[in-house]
Image (tube, rainbow, N blue to C red):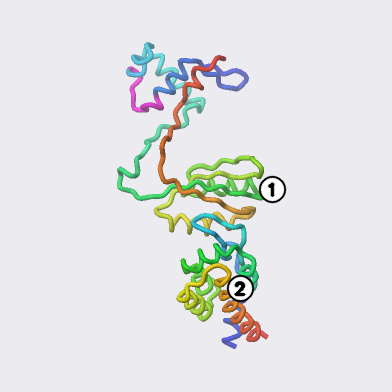
């Protein structure tokens, strides 16, 4: 039961002001945003790799995932990803792998 | 100063008074009168009319924040918007205290130009990410951080008061 309620919290759609907004550098917004983990996962596939690099190394992804979605486990996995210093498409692939693995697990819990 | 069909018409003396005030709003009527070769009572009368009509909106102090020891960054945001939401975005931006100027511009796309200040780059980014990007109708944002300012003037320019009516 505990798992179900925290899972649905992590998988919920957050209000517009709490969505994740993708930037490529300070103040430069791409026009892409993610109001949920599901959309976040889709965006990883298509967003400019520069944006992924910008946010990963600032700690923005882990902050949003832990602080807004409430998923400390995924936030920790993303934090660990930084130690391998991936860039460009390698970063995209690794980030997608980490997030999709967690997302699939959460979807299973939610059933 | 005359008012014709509800519109204010300023003459050359009015413009010269405005230019003097913009140079130094603390000048007295007597000093401005001496500068322009006009009686101080005329200056008093003209300024009073321009204040009453709203031509002179207010008197303020222009600060040099760097000399006051305040660290800050200034940036110019170019905000591309959905044309249907552009006016709302401009209004919402105008309500934010970090935003100093807001104007609209039309080139290939409709956009809003806004001057913004923040304590540092990190706070600037947080402000844009949390308060500007989420506004309904914002399509994307380009931000340029000002590194050096060569000129900043808001005074009445020669092109205004020397024009021929």
**Residue B141: percent from left, percent from top:** 57, 52
On screen, residue B134 versus residue B157, left or right, reads right
Q: In front here: A46 or A105?
A: A46
Can you tell which quarter of the image residue A7 is in?
bottom right
How many circles with numbers are drawn on the protein?
2
**Residue A1: percent from left, percent from top:** 60, 88
Identify the disc placed on residue B98.
Answer: none
Q: Residues within 10 Å of mark 2 (few under 14, many from 20)?
A: many
Circle 2: element type:
helix
Residue at the spot 30% in from the left edge and 43% down from the top edge? B67
**Residue B148: percent from left, percent from top:** 40, 43
As drawn, B40 above or below B137: above
As drawn, B112 above or below B31: below
Q: Quadrant of the C terminus of chain A?
A: bottom right
Magenta-highlighted residues:
B21-30
Give the alpha-carbon distance from disc 1 to disc 2, as whole Å. Answer: 29 Å
Residue at the spot 56% in from the left edge and 47% down from the top edge? B78
- Is B154 magenta? The answer is no
Q: Is disc 2 on the same chain as disc 1?
A: no
Q: Residue furthest bottom?
A: A1
Circle 1: element type:
loop
Identify the disc placed on residue A37.
Answer: 2
Can you tell which quarter of the image residue B34 is in?
top left
Q: In front here: B121 or A7?
A: B121
As drawn, B16 above or below B72: above
Which subunit holds the residue at mark 2? A
Identify the disc placed on residue B84.
Answer: 1
Residue at the spot 56% in from the left edge and 21% down from the top edge? B8
Which subunit holds the residue at mark 1? B
On screen, residue A66 versus residue A45, left or right, reads left
Residue at the spot 35% in from the left edge and 16% down from the top edge? B35
């Amino acid at each position: 039961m505990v798992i179900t309620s925290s899972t649905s919290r992590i998988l919920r759609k957050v209000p517009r002001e709490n969505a994740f907004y993708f930037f490529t550098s300070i103040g430069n917004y791409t026009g892409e945003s993610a109001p949920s983990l599901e959309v976040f996962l889709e965006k990883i596939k298509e967003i400019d790799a520069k944006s992924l690099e910008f946010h990963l190394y600032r700690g923005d992804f882990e902050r949003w995932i832990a602080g807004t979605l409430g998923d400390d486990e995924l936030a920790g996995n993303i934090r660990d990803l930084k130690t391998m210093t991936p860039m460009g498409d390698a970063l995209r692939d690794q980030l997608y792998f980490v997030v999709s693995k967690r997302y699939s697990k959460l979807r299973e819990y939610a059933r | 100063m005359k008012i014709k069909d509800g519109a204010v018409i300023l003459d050359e003396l009015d413009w010269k008074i405005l230019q003097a005030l913009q140079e130094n709003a603390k000048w007295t009527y007597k000093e401005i009168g001496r500068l322009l070769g006009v009686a101080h009572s005329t200056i008093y009368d003209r300024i009073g009319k321009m204040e009453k009509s709203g031509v002179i909106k207010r008197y303020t102090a222009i600060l040099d924040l760097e000399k006051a020891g305040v660290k800050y960054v200034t940036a110019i945001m170019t905000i591309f918007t959905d044309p249907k939401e552009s006016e709302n975005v401009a209004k919402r931006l105008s309500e934010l205290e970090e935003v100093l100027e807001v104007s609209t511009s039309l080139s290939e796309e409709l956009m809003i130009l806004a001057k913004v200040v923040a304590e540092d780059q990190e706070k600037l980014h947080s402000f844009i990410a949390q308060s500007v990007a989420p506004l309904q109708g914002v399509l994307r944002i380009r931000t340029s951080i000002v590194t050096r300012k060569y000129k900043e003037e808001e005074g009445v320019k020669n092109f205004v008061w020397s024009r021929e009516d």
